[in-house]
Amino acid sequence: MNKYEIALVLSSRIDDEAREATLTRVKNRVEKSGSTVTDIDDKGKQRLAYEIQDMIEGYYYFLHFEGPEDAPAFIERHLRIYENVIRFLIVKQDA
């Protein structure tokens, strides 16, 4: 099993319930890939480096998980279609 991290930026236009629902969907998708979520780090609402879809702020999360080599590709395919996810990046962490 490899260790990965997802840097996730959610839209600032959604309410708390929708944000939690989106985060739960992402977590469930990670688990469906055969991976285990080890930690979720909520960084809160922060200013974006540049404007995205007329937004200057977003909610930042970092999800740490352990999973097989094909897990990032599986997760990425689904993150691309979630409308509340405005940016994401999946990276493999060093051992």
Image (tube, rainbow, N blue to C red):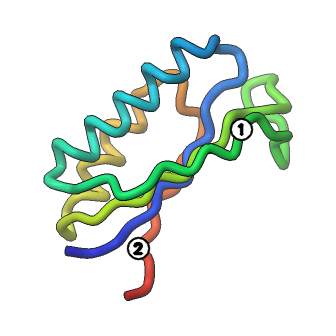
Viewer-nearest of discs 1 and 2: 1
Residue 50 lies, in percent from the top left, at 84, 44
1 left or right, relative to 6: left
Provide the secondary structure element on which disc 2 rests. Answer: strand
Residue 85 lies, in percent from the top left, at 53, 32
Task: Kindly identify the amino acid type of the residue bearing the numbered disc 1.
Answer: Gly
Give the position of the N terminus as an image quadrant: bottom left
Q: Residues within 10 Å of mark 1 (few under 14, many from 20)?
A: few
Q: CB under 8 Å between callouts 1 and 2?
A: no
Query: Closer to the camera, 56 or 28?
Result: 28
Residue under label 1: 44
**Is the residue 69 above or below the residue 89 in the image?**
below
Residue visible at 62% across and 40% down in the picture: 9
Q: Which mark is residue 9?
A: none
Residue visible at 19% across and 63% down in the picture: 70
The answer to which quarter of the image holds residue 38 is bottom left
Residue under label 2: 92
Task: Kindly identify the amino acid type of the residue bearing the numbered disc 2.
Answer: Lys
**Is the residue 36 above or below the residue 13 in the image?**
below
Q: Residue furthest bottom?
A: 95
7 left or right, relative to 73: right
Residue 89 lies, in percent from the top left, at 52, 56
**Is the residue 40 above or below the residue 45 in the image?**
below
Of callouts 1 and 2, the N-terminal one? 1
